[in-house]
Image (spheres, grey):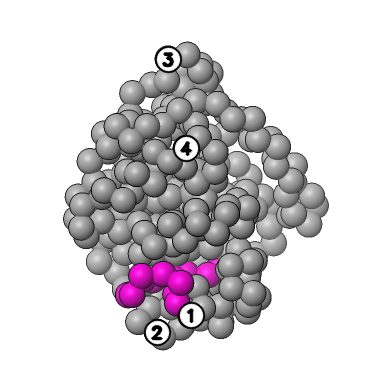
Amino acid sequence: MYAGGAVTILVSAARSGADCVHAGSVGTGRYGDLIRQVLSGAGVTISSPPVADADTGVCLVFVEPTGERTFITIQGAERHITEASLATSCPVAGDMVAVSGYTLQGPTCAPLMAWLSGLPRGVEVVLDPGEAFAELDDAAQQAALDLTTIWTSNADEARVLTGDPDMMTSPIKVAALLPEGALVIVRDGPAGCAVCADGVTTVVPGFPQTPIDTNGAGDTHTGVMMAEMLAGMAPVDAARRANAAGALKVTQRGFDTLPTRAQIDKFLDRQNAGE
């Protein structure tokens, strides 16, 4: 049993040097306590008050020998957000706010969109759409896209939005749906990712591994990518480190094995040495 989802993004970013805050709601009970323990251990602050009458929900993950996954989700306190609870995180210009497409469904959509619409100028909104984004109606999708300054998804999620399955060509089509100047990252597992910035798409090769556990690899990629860009690294360079982090993650079981900056450095040194 692990704390995953948004926790994976935050812990991955923190282990790469970012100062992180969890804006979402966390329950009171064994699952909420687990989240608090993991985030505290990584130096991540939870800004919103605990939900007193509910525990955090659970996601059951079934992993096939091929790495394919099936999810069963039981929702809980994480759905009890308000515009005021999110505002406790107090982002300022230069910060990044990571948003999951799953939070754009159901009762969390309205308060989240209201809060995002009022963010200070200069705060980057990073959308990881997930499969849930395709289930939103056109108006909800467009409202979210209008606020997104950084899109990060896998190739299939980009295909659903654009009709293009190609990691190389879909990012520019995603970018056309976002505000001018938006950054687009499209991942494709061991093939790496493509980064589209200012109309130019660059493929950043991956580091194929024999997977043991693919859970959290995309969230790990997102967390490290954000941390490195927050530190001033160019998106393509940040993407290479994020690819390395994802490669390290799939070789370890569970969410408590997320790579540190030093581990990513060591991995890349070995790659550069041709090992």
The quadrant holding residue 167 is: bottom right
Return the residue nearer the eye: 261 or 104.
104
What is the residue that sits farthest to the top in this orientation?
53
Q: Earlier in the sequence, mark 1 or mark 3?
A: 3
Q: Which residue is mark 2?
A: 199
Residue for badge 1: 172
Q: Which residue is mark 3?
A: 52
Q: What's the residue at 41%, 85% (across, down)?
A: 200
Q: Residues within 10 Å of mark 1 (few under 14, many from 20)?
A: many
Q: Nearer the viewer, mark 2 or mark 4?
A: 4
Question: Is residue 37 depicted above or below 121 in this figure?
Answer: above
Three-letter residue code for mark 1: Ile
Report the residue at 38% width, 21% height from top. Answer: 50
Q: Is 198 displayed left or right of 207 in the figure?
A: left
Q: Quadrant of residue 196?
A: bottom left
Q: Is residue 250 above or below residue 184?
A: above
What quarter of the picture does the N terminus occupy? top right
